[in-house]
């Protein structure tokens, strides 16, 4: 792995990568920050060391770190994709190029390309290979990156559309009562702020999707597993808002007024066959654009704990369960005064040690002794 990382850094320069993904380079080797919206470029590229530093957010690193942060990827996935751009072997064999790759090892198979995507992939790869004089493996790798970005764009389009559709229908009365009950304790303002919504009719929602989007777009959305609508019984929807757009959805079990699931989990995530809908991401991540370095920041387990603490004027982000901590996003939060509050159970205790060990500085842990989670604690006090 170390040799592969070193080879990536030696082969790919920032100028090459930025040109390939369409990022404008301003005088002085500055670009617009990839971490926040801005008009004046504050992220500087250092060609000699092949590194970067964002003066607006105090974040920096090497080309792998940049690529992972820009595309919101785990480091392992970023290395795999960059390795394919280089045309070198990957430890995971996903990007192992042969002179005559078989169908079983082709990128089209590895990324489950739909028929419509295969046409785009082949057309774009051919253009890059013959007009830009790029070797075939590299051209195919760049084409795959463009396909993944296209998937992300489609997903955001559909998620924002389904939110608007469901909001026009109004939130289900029983779902609203549950969210504002003593158990959850959310205010109407919080429900609106975090864009929580509910699905009234699964049939009508599916009809809306079919009437307004192409079949392949619906598949890419990750809302279905084969022909099954994943949120059929998880009808309270929790949007993950990134850069002011809904980029991901999670569903909380709420079926015919019942909140306790039978033979299923309390929460469900999108189908991640597209490799662009990983649950390993921070909820309420846009909050960081309003914070300054060294401000206090609480990381909670579960979106509802985040919302209730935010409702109590505590700056919070969340993870979707202890197994979904986004290691590739550690640099986004490491400059804050961090607090970590996980659920009061065996999994929470174990994860507390694992997560704190990921940081190179002390993190304050909030251990709950008499309550299962922060929601229960805060609602008892209110």
Image (cartoon, rainbow, N blue to C red):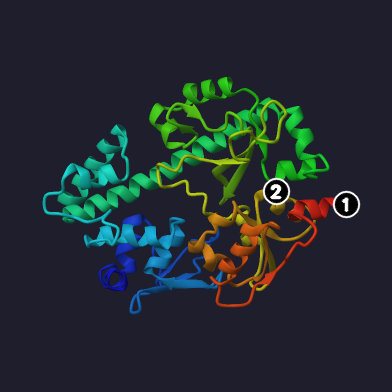
Residue 310, placed above or below residue 197: below
Going from N to C along the chain, the mark reached first, 2 or 1, is 2
Residue 33 at least partly seen: no
- Residue occupying image coordinates x 60% and y 72%: 335
Is 56 situated above or below 100? below
Q: How many marks?
A: 2
Identify the image quadrant of residue 6: bottom left
Where is residue 25 drawn, in percent x and y? 39, 64
Task: In the displayed orientation, state which residue is furthest to the left.
Answer: 99
Q: Residue 17: in sight, yes or no?
A: yes
Crowd tier of the residue under label 1, counting other residues whose Cα lies within 10 Å: few below 14, some 14–19, many 20 or above:
few
Residue at x 21%, y 44% (from the top left corner): 104
Q: Which residue is mark 2?
A: 304
The mark found on residue 326 in the picture is: none
- Which quadrant would residue 66 be assigned to in this image? bottom left
Query: Is 268 located above or below residue 144 in the figure?
Result: above
Out of 380 and 148, give the one closest to the viewer. 380
Task: Looking at the picture, tell me which residue is in the foreground, 186 or 266.
Answer: 266
Q: Quadrant of residue 371?
A: bottom right
* Whole-number angstrom distance, CA of label 2 to CA of label 1: 16 Å
Query: Which residue in the rendered view is the most extreme toward the right?
Result: 382
**Observer-nearest residue: 133 or 66?**
66
Left or right? Give the position of 343 relative to 51. Answer: right
Q: Residue at x 56, y 72 (%)?
A: 357
* Mark 1 lies on residue: 382
Q: Position of residue 139 (x, y in %)?
A: 22, 52
Per the image, label 2 sits on a secondary structure element best described as helix
- For the residues bearing labels 2 and 1, Cβ distance under 8 angstroms: no
Q: Secondary structure at mark 1?
A: loop
């Amino acid at each position: 792995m170390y040799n592969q990382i070193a080879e990536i850094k030696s082969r790919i320069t920032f100028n090459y990568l930025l040109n390939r993904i369409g990022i404008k380079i301003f005088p002085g080797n500055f670009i617009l920050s990839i971490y926040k919206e801005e008009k004046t470029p504050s992220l500087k590229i250092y060609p000699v060391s092949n590194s970067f530093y964002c003066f607006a957010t105090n974040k920096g690193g090497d080309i792998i770190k940049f690529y992972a942060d820009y595309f919101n990827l785990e480091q392992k996935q970023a290395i795999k994709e960059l390795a394919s751009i280089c045309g070198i072997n990957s430890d995971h064999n996903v990007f192992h190029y042969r002179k005559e790759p078989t169908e079983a090892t082709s990128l089209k198979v590895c990324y489950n390309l739909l028929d419509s995507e295969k046409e785009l992939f082949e057309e774009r790869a051919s253009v890059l290979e013959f007009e830009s004089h790029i070797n075939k493996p590299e051209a195919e790798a760049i084409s795959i990156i463009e396909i993944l970005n296209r998937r992300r764009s489609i997903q955001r389009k559909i998620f924002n559309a389904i939110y608007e559709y469901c909001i026009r229908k109004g939130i289900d009365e029983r779902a609203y009562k549950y969210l504002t009950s003593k158990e959850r304790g959310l205010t109407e303002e919080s429900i609106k702020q975090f864009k929580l919504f509910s699905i009234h009719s699964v049939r009508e929602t599916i009809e809306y999707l079919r009437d307004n989007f192409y079949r392949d777009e619906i598949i890419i959305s990750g809302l279905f597993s084969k022909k099954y609508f994943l949120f059929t019984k998880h009808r309270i929807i929790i949007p993950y808002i990134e850069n002011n757009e809904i980029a991901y959805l999670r569903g909380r079990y709420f079926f015919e007024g019942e909140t306790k699931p039978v033979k299923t989990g309390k929460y469900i995530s999108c189908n991640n066959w597209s490799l662009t809908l990983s649950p390993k991401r921070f909820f309420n991540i846009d909050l960081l654009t309003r914070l300054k370095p060294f401000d206090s920041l609480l990381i909670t387990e579960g979106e509802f704990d985040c919302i209730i603490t935010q409702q109590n004027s505590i700056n919070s982000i969340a993870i979707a369960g202890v197994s979904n901590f986004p290691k590739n996003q550690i640099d986004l939060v490491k400059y804050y005064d961090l607090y970590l509050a996980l659920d009061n159970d065996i999994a929470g205790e174990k994860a507390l040690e694992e997560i704190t060990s990921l940081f190179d500085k002390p993190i304050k842990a909030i251990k709950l002794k008499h309550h299962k989670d922060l929601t229960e604690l805060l609602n008892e006090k209110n």
